Structure formats: structure tokens, C-alpha cells
Amino acid sequence: MFKLSDFDFHGKTALVRGDLDVPLRKCQMSNVKCPMWEVEDDTRIEACLPTIEYLLGQRAKVILMGHLGEPRGRIVEELKLTPVAEKLGELLSLTIPRQQPKVRSRIQNIPVYFLGDNLWLLENLKFYPGEEGNDLEFSKRLASLGNFYVNESFAVSHRRYASLVQLPRLLPHCAGFNFVEEVKNLSRVLEDPKRPVVFIIGGAKTETKLPVIGDLLGKADVFLLGGGVANTFMVAEPRHPKTIGKSLFDQAQLENVRKILAREKGQKVEFSGVKSIYKIKIPTNLVIAKKEDGDFSGTEVVDIGGKSGEVFDQEKMIVDIGPKTRELYGKVINQAGTVVFVGPMGLIEKKRFSQGTKAVFEAMANSTAFKVVGGGDSIAALNSFGLFSKMDFVSLGGGAMLEFLAKGTLPGIEALRRENG
Ligand code: ADP
Ligand code: MG
């Protein structure tokens, strides 16, 4: 891959594809008539600062690009990049009014936020169908704005979007500093990792997580599952499928998961101090609760392995891993050489259901393994527990990290590897 240091940016314009898809929250001052959003977790924005600052230091002009949320090719008011522009201004200590930074102009018919004479931010790329459609004409519009293309968006590089795979065809291209760090650190998990290698996979975005588990079977010694990922395995189990009430699971991938289970063939792994466990460990001690009017009631801990499975109240849903599973996961993590975490174990948005995730992070923090965490929501949780600095590497990619670990490359990486013309 080409690096920033391979080019002379002096007096040129660099198009930087950043990873700006950050969690937002309503400002405290906001009201229904005038909702204002602010960035809740700026980890991803911070990660592109070194590249931006380097380019500005090289006397280049920077046009930053990125997307926020899933507007699906339409303009969605609350997904405008205003809060991101504000946060960028704050972090770069440039002068941006604390209220809405005004969009003052359009280039190639795309609104632009002016963050400084040499730093512009283009409006949410996913407002344009060409981005997700990987459209060449859209890419040409973007390419016409600059002389160089820099990918600083590892977390999105598993997607074949225009700004990730087409732009490098049209402009001299390279990877940003954080992108290079991602590849370097994640390669440590791929190349001769310290064993045992433990993958902890949870969360709700099952469509990016479940398909790669099959590819990871040969690389991991054990999988500790949680969240919607674990639920899907519970339902898919061919011999003892579980009925899990209103729990989240991925119907579309049951067949796929059955194939993974068939390949894994009930393989067991030994860890001292615990009974041998299946290579793909599905939690059996769980917290369940009934969802009502946006809140939860009737929280209880159940064992769904074995006979007690029948007591699962079908009006309830799984909201976290239970204390026994936390303890088991902790013991496995304690003996691991490498731990990769992606996707929370439970509904982290509710503090009382974030305890399973917290326990797993704490076990990781206390372990001597090489510890990697990825995924937007996972990182936000890690931050909220104050354990960010205890990890060896925090990857901005959730799906992208897993796909890189499974396949050893990503579409965005391949695009950067192509000859610079
Ligand atoms: P990441 O961003 O870390 O990759 P995901 O986006 O896949 O993770 O998933 C995060 C979401 O998963 C959180 O909003 C959390 O509430 C949800 N989640 C975790 N466990 C469950 C569960 N058992 N049921 C429903 N949602 C869950
Ligand atoms: Mg997420």
C-alpha cells in the first residue's frame, strides 16, 4: 500500500475519505422544534486528525469526505454532517461558531462546510445514491475536486463504495496514518499470534458478523458469543434449537450458521479451571427481560441449556449474558494469548444490561493477552467504562476488522494496492 510519505502534497488538494460515522446524541439545549445533535463519541474523528494535520502541515488543501448513518441516497436532515463539522472544528481549534456551522457553498453540487481556508468538509456522501452504488460518474465528480486521494477510513473499507474503491482508480492514492496502523496491528492477530486465540463476538449487526465466523474457524481457538450473534446460534442449533421469545436473531442466516456448526462438529477446547467448552461457545446463563413502552420489566437470570430451557418466558427477550457465563468467559480470557472483541454482549444502552459487556472488558483489561477491540458501539462502551487505554489496540472497524481478520484483505485495501498511475 502507498503511504502519505510517498507523495509531495505541497500546494495540492488531497481528498481524504474519513470515517465520520459517529454516534450522536441530542444536545441538552435542544427542543422538539429545533433539535440539535452533537457527537457522542469522537474516537473516529480523532483518528483522522493526524492525517489531516500532516497534510495541512505540508501546505496542502484538504477536502474531507465521509458518511453518517444510513440515509440511503436521500437527504435526511438529522444526518447532515453539521455535528461532525462542529466537533472537527473544536478538535482542530479552528474558529467555528458553536452553533450550526453554516454551509456556505456547494462544489460539484455537494454542500461544503468550511472549517478553515485549507480544510473543507463535504456533506454526507450517502445522501447521494452514487456512493453506495459505487457509481463511476459520482466518483468522477469527487475526483475533479482534488489531486490526490487518501483513504483514512479503514472501518468502511469492507464496502464497495465509490469513495473507497472508485476514487483510487481515478487519482494517485495512499493510505492515511490510522489506516496503516489498523493493518499493522490487526496483522499481528493474523501472523503467528500468541495462542490461544479467543474471538468474542456479539452485537446486533449480525449480517456483517455471522458470515465471517466460518472463515475465522481455522484462525481462532475459541469463540465466546453474545448478543444477537449468540441468539442466532441458539436458534440454529440442529439438535437442541432454543425458543428464545422476543430475542433478536437473524432468521436469514440460520442455514449459514448451521453449516458453520456442522463444520465445527462439536469440537471441544480445554481451559484449566473450567469444564471443556465447545469451540463455539454459546452462552447458557442469560439475563432476560420484558420490553414494554421502551423500557424493561421482569428482569431475571435463566439457564437455557438443559431442561430449564423450558422456563424461558416467551414474552421476554435476552438482554445480556448472565453471571455464570461472565465468570466462564473471564476464565477463558484470563488464559488467552490473543483476544479479539467485537460487538457487545448485551443491551449496553441500558446500564443494567451492560454488566456482561463490562465484565468481559474487565477480564480483558486484567489479562496479559494481546487485546484488540473493534466496532463502533463496542468502542463507545469501552470508553464509558474507562477501559480504552487498557487495550493493546482499538480498531475503528467492526465489520471491517472481522472481514480483514477473516480474509486478510478488504476491497478498500485492494484498491489502494493498485499501481499509482
Ligand atoms: P459494534 O458497533 O460494536 O460492531 P453492533 O453494531 O453489531 O456492535 O451492535 C451493537 C448493538 O447490539 C447495541 O446497540 C446493543 O444494544 C445491541 N445488542 C447487544 N446484545 C443484544 C441483544 N441480546 N438483543 C438485542 N440487541 C443487542
Ligand atoms: Mg454498531
Image (cartoon, helix red, strand yellow):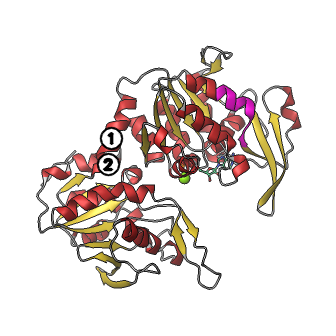
Q: Which residues are magenta?
A: 320-329
The residue depicted at 27 percent of the width and 52 percent of the height is 176
387 horizontally vs 404: left or right: right
Which quarter of the rendering shows the C terminus?
bottom left
| Within-10-Å neighbours for mark 1: few <14, some 14–19, many 20+ | some
- For badge 1, the amino acid type reads Val
Q: Position of residue 212 (x, y in %)?
A: 49, 38
Magenta stretch secondary structure, dominant: helix
Query: Is the residue under label 2 in contact with that under label 1 (CB below 8 Å)?
Result: yes
**370 or 231, which is in the foreground?**
370
Judge whether residue 408 can be spotted in this image.
Answer: no
Q: Tag 2: Cα neighbours inside 10 Å, few (<14), some, or many (≥20)? A: many
In the rendered image, which residue does mark 1 sit on? 183
Left or right placement of residue 395 versus residue 326 in this view: left
- Name the mark on residue 236: none
| Residue 239 location (% of width, % of height) | 74, 26
Q: Which residue is mark 2?
A: 179
At 38% from the left and 37% from the top, the residue drawn is 186
- Quadrant hosting residue 26: bottom right
* Label 1 residue SS: helix
The residue nearer to you, when weighing 91 against 186, is 91
Q: Quadrant of residue 144?
A: bottom left
**Could you tell me how far apart the alpha carbons at marks 1 and 2 are, in whole angstroms?**
6 Å
Q: Is residue 40 above or below residue 157?
A: below
Classify 274 as above or below 231.
above
